[in-house]
Image (tube, rainbow, N blue to C red):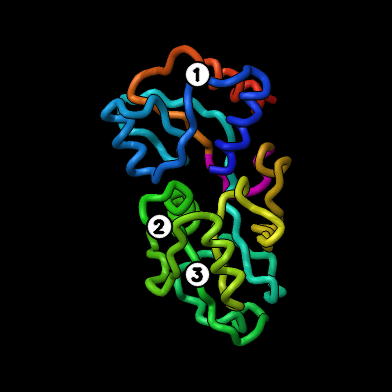
Amino acid sequence: EAFAVRQFTAWSQVAGVPEFDLEIWPESAAFEAADEGDVAAVLVLQSPPEGWFAAPVGVEGICVIVNAENPLRAFSLEDLAELFGGRSQTWEEFGGASEPVQPVIPLPGDGLRAGFEEKVMRGAPLSGGSLLAPSAEAAITLVAEHPGAIGLIPFNSADDRARLARIDGVLPADATLQDGRYPLTLPILLISPEEPEGSIRDWIVWLQARISP
């Protein structure tokens, strides 16, 4: 959402008022609307249905955030599997306080969650005691409210309230996402049942030029 809004605004400043509108939809509803022809294209973090057009237009990072009172800000991928899988019950196991670990995860079907499950959980289930956050804003709020919380948000949605953690020694940043040093990245795809034309195609070309080395 944050990536789409920022890039749409920047494109508007370059090309003038676009001939299309940007709307924020739940991913499942957006897929269905695109399939039925009600929307022209969708920006997603997951693979499109077979036969659909897909163009990479950016890179998103899966960021791990912790409560401001938690001094632990560096984890390995193995640590994350333990924490989000519910196998580590308290932060004391990582040298922190005895505060219970409280995972905060996106809703089922969310592309960020699917990417985390693939890259980190690798078939293991997420903790059944996780709190569900319908948006990055909700995740940031929930983590701020629970001292033992650890959550997932997109890099492009991080703000000053989000305490970002290093993963395998690397902090998420524009540079570390672009050069591949940060281990948890996903391609941002613009997808559609058919290849877009007109101003949407122009926007794709413009977006791809911004991510070209």
Task: Name the residue located 66 percent from the left edge and 25 percent from the top edge.
Answer: 210
* Depicted 197 relative to depicted 148: above or below: above
Q: Which residue is mark 2?
A: 107
> CB under 8 Å between callouts 3 and 1?
no
Query: Disc 1 on helix, strand or loop?
Result: loop
**Magenta stretch in the rendered image:** 179-186
* Depicted 81 relative to depicted 116: above or below: below
Task: Name the residue located 41 percent from the left edge and 50 percent from the top edge.
Answer: 110
Question: In front: 112, or 146?
Answer: 146
Residue 92, percent from left and from top: 62, 84
* Amino acid type, mark 2: Leu
Q: CA distance from mark 2 to mark 1?
A: 32 Å
- How crowded is the residue under tag 3: few (<14 C-alpha within 10 Å), some, or many (20+)? many
| The stretch drawn in magenta includes residue 185 | yes
Residue 82 in sight here: no
Q: Which one is earlier in the sequence, the residue at label 2 or at label 1?
A: 1
Of all residues, the one furthest to the top in this rendering is: 198
- How crowded is the residue under tag 2: few (<14 C-alpha within 10 Å), some, or many (20+)? some
Q: Which one is earlier in the sequence, the residue at label 3 or at label 1?
A: 1
Task: Name the residue located 47 percent from the left edge and 29 percent from the top edge.
Answer: 190
Q: Is residue 91 left or right of residue 213?
A: left
Residue 19's disc is: 1
Residue 81, percent from left and from top: 50, 65
Q: Nearer the viewer, mark 2 or mark 1?
A: 1
Q: Nearer the viewer, mark 3 or mark 1?
A: 1
Residue 103's disc is: 3
Quarter placement of the C terminus:
top right
Query: Disc 2 on helix, strand or loop?
Result: loop
Residue 168, percent from left and from top: 66, 58
